[in-house]
Amino acid sequence: EDEVHVKQKVTEVDPLEEANFDQELKAVVQARESMEQRRQELRGRPTLNMMIPMNVFEGSAKDHHGRGISGESGDEALDEDTGGNREVQVRVLVKRGNKQQTKQMFIPRNSSLVQSTKQKEAAELQE
Amino acid sequence: EDTGDDDNYEYGKGDFTEHACRYCGVSNPACVVRCNVPSCRKWFCNSRGNTSGSHIVNHLVRAKHKEVCLHKDSPLGETILECYNCGCRNVFLLGFISAKTESVVVLLCREPCLSVNALKDMNWDLSQWCPLIDDRCFLQWLVKIPSEQEQLRARQISAQQINKVEELWKTNPDASFEDLEKPGVDDEPQSVALKYEDAYQYQNVFAPLIKLEADYDKMMKESQSKDNVTIRWDIGLNKKRVAYFVFPKEDNELRLVPGDELRLRYSGDAAHPAWQSVGHVIKLTAQEEVALELRASQGVPVDVNHGFSVDFVWKSTSFDRMQGAMKTFAVDETSVSGYIYHHLLGHEVEVQMVRNALPRRFGAPGLPELNASQVFAVKSVLQRPISLIQGPPGTGKTVTSAALVYHMAKQGQGQVLVCAPSNVAVDQLAEKISATGLKVVRLCAKSREAVSSPVEHLTLHYQVRHLDTSDKSELHKLQQLKDEQGELSSSDEKKYKALKRATEREISQSADVICCTCVGAGDPRLANFRFRQVLIDESTQATEPECLIPLVLGAKQVVLVGDHCQLGPVIMCKKAARAGLAQSLFERLVLLGVKPIRLQVQYRMHPCLSEFPSNSFYEGTLQNGVTVNERQSSGIDFPWPVPNRPMFFYVQMGQEEISASGTSYLNRTEAANVEKIVTTFLKSGVVPSQIGVITPYEGQRAYIVNYMSRNGALRQQLYKEIEVASVDSFQGREKDYIILSCVRSNEHQGIGFLNDPRRLNVALTRARYGIVILGNPKVLSKQPLWNSLLTHYKEHECLVEGPLNNLKQSMVQFQKPKKIYN
Ligand SMILES: [Zn+2]
Ligand SMILES: [Zn+2]
Ligand SMILES: [Zn+2]
């Protein structure tokens, strides 16, 4: 109801500022010491600790076999045809302390996570 | 004991935005994450704003923080983002992987878990690792990007500001943006602007100005203590003690008004212990006596009359409410509609029309017929979300406003809020609106409930007392008990207060229209009310933050009525005035290009009197709704130099002097001539109530009052009944005859107050039948506007000198007006 059209000013990012930020970002992402430190830390520990609750891969396996990440709604095919921007449902696996939980989430079909999986699927299907 | 104060009330909604982005204020739980570094724990959103990276990424990079936690109301709930395998929390290392065959995803760190071979054997597709932070932004499906609207309404922060505030946080983690821009103690405050990036910037500019004004007001009022005050005791109808005394004002600055709080003290003597009590001013008598209703009922030394002291009790309430309104405006998205938000800040907004059915006729029951320009005003305003109505003197602003409110109330959009900066204006408007048949509640400050009001029957406190007077009513019983005993037991008092509050709410909610002052709109009793439609009368006499108080209760349609060609708000602190606090919202909107709808027919002045103001202040557009005949004073024998032209400029050459207080001016010759003119009016059959003497200076005002009472040729009482007041206090009112004493008369100094064209406009437009101006043309003619006024009087043979019974045209030479440089 409260719709308002503000004539938007074009926001210009100061290029110097941007360069400066990028440099700092790189420093954070590639922080050598922390990377080394992590390797050290993890050396003594078991490297695989992926406790997956059993039910995650159960139940839905049959229905969705071969489809990878997919929506559960019936109009799935329609979306693909129209190249629609609809969302697909995923379960995100998180840990709360030692407990594992899954949470439902919707991810846009055009997100890279979905896209890459779809491409892969398609490639596999070709084979 | 009902103190009626809201000292403990916290103004401005602030608490619910604990999780608001510390950069921009966006507080949508789906869009924000918390920095998880224990010493930080600040929230940031995922919008880029004006920067290349999103706010959260900006913070993490600049502060070198690496851990975050999602909001409890986000889809994943309160979750610290960490690697599912190793628990690594460095968000710059994290990314999602999905199962090969399932719609299941987990977070996994890039190093080392992504290279753990064992994982490949499981169901996970490691080749498709997808970083959590992509293109300097968190994955949008995990942390949403605020909508365009949300971003537009947020604080517009630049990369430079981010760097600055991050720097500041290193030494003071609680610092806010306001701290960044705080001027030093001796700095000039930042000046007001035409446009603001956002409501935070707006607040940053106005908050220090309001603070300056508040500090000045406090300092001034608290320094007004008076000793050796003589008291006359009385008892009010409500059985409360009333103290009468004279509280002399020494200069123009402090005006006591009903509702002000004073403390009365007695230091004690052999027979009386020391005593003090606070009370409210309930009225000011014509003899300049103050009536103070005391809060205390016991121990009052009523058998003593001399040796009391009086202090002013300063209240920050009105300033707190302004600050609160600005805060609400910034942090509460529902405070005003998006359109109004952007419009007030000067953003370019696409024109919007209000889609409402227009009434068939624009007048309202119980009001006079509207003229064409009034109809046009009502019609246009009903169709727009923001409008300005300019009402030059005598053009029927109040009737037009009342008709407008009538139609707005009939549109069924809920209650209409009607405000004005002054109580007098609110009362006038409330009365007119009530005449249309609408249900009106006039909400008064609790401190003013004892002050008599011309619309008492409309006031909330009166309606509460008279709602249900049947014996069954519990509230009524308790009220009677309280009146009789002066106080109630604590349990009864509790019950009484709860019942009263409930009744107040019930009555307020059933009204069509709520009327109160702008500051009154911040009353906690209205805290849960929403008003889509708000009309503010006399809005050109309010500061912007004052105007904002009624607007932030949900306004979607705003009508500002006023006249920016008359005097604006009174700002006492020069620093704040210089920085622009005296500019009203109405004026700024005019500067932004909102065209005021002007009411064009004046019903006050004799056509001869409206000619100059119309040409000088209103581009000649003011038409006369009264004829010469209707303004002919029959039977009044007054020596107007030109018959049928009831005006003249009386040339005075007497010297100006500095008044005893040292802060004002007076002019004895002018005062003596004012007395002569008043006497001539009285002798010719004019009654005292028809005459108003106005002068810009308090020194001259006091001197004239004194002079007339001592030297008046007629009965003293007649002179006492004549109102002598400053130009400023005469705004909004009228008299049949006006005598204006200009005072200033010097070779080299300026003309002070007279320099303001708006003050001249007000002074010239108070009279209905006739006006006499006393002044020194040689001095006044240096100012361009006064020069043209003098020329106008001269051309009409109304510039005169000599004794009143033998006025002759003056040949005094004018000075060349100084050019105005902008
Ligand atoms: Zn942090
Ligand atoms: Zn933000
Ligand atoms: Zn890991």
Image (tube, grey):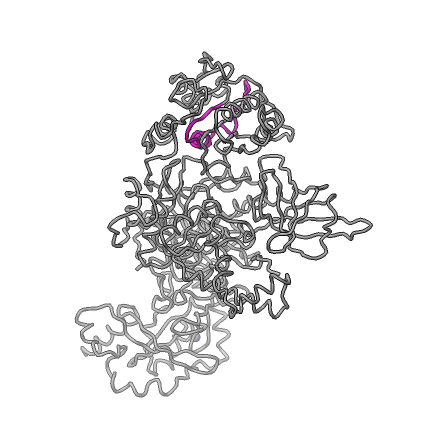
Say which of B283 and B494 sits in front: B283
Q: Is residue B507 magenta?
A: no
Asked where in the image residue B715 lies, by quadrant, the reply is: top right
Q: Residue at x 38, y 18 (%)?
A: B796
Residue B760 covered by magenta stretch: yes
Of the pair B561 and B746, the residue shown nearer to us: B561
Give coordinates of residue B579: x percent, y percent: 49, 39
Q: Is residue B436 above or below residue B471?
A: above
Q: Which residues are magenta?
A: B745-773
B354, B189: nearer the viewer: B354
Q: Quadrant of the N terminus of chain B?
A: bottom right
Classify the position of ligand 3 by quadrant: top left, top right, bottom left or bottom right. bottom left
Residue at x-position 26% and y-position 48% = B361
On the picture, is B266 further left or further right than B521?
right
Does residue A25 appear anywhere in the picture? no
Q: How many marks?
A: 0
Of B778 and B402, nearer the camera is: B402
Q: Quadrant of the C terminus of chain B?
A: top left
In the image, residue B588 lies at what x, y percent?
A: 40, 41
Q: Which residue is located at x 54 percent, y 53 percent?
A: B449
Quarter of the rendering containing residue A77: bottom left
Query: Eyeballing the image, is B635 above or below A16?
Result: above
Q: Visible in this render: residue B195?
A: yes
User: Is B351 positioned to the left or the right of B207 in the image?
Assistant: left
Q: Is residue B767 above or below residue A38?
A: above
Residue B288 image point, x, y percent: 60, 39
Q: Position of residue B523 (x, y in %)?
A: 50, 56
Instruction: Name the quadrant containing residue B703.
Output: top right
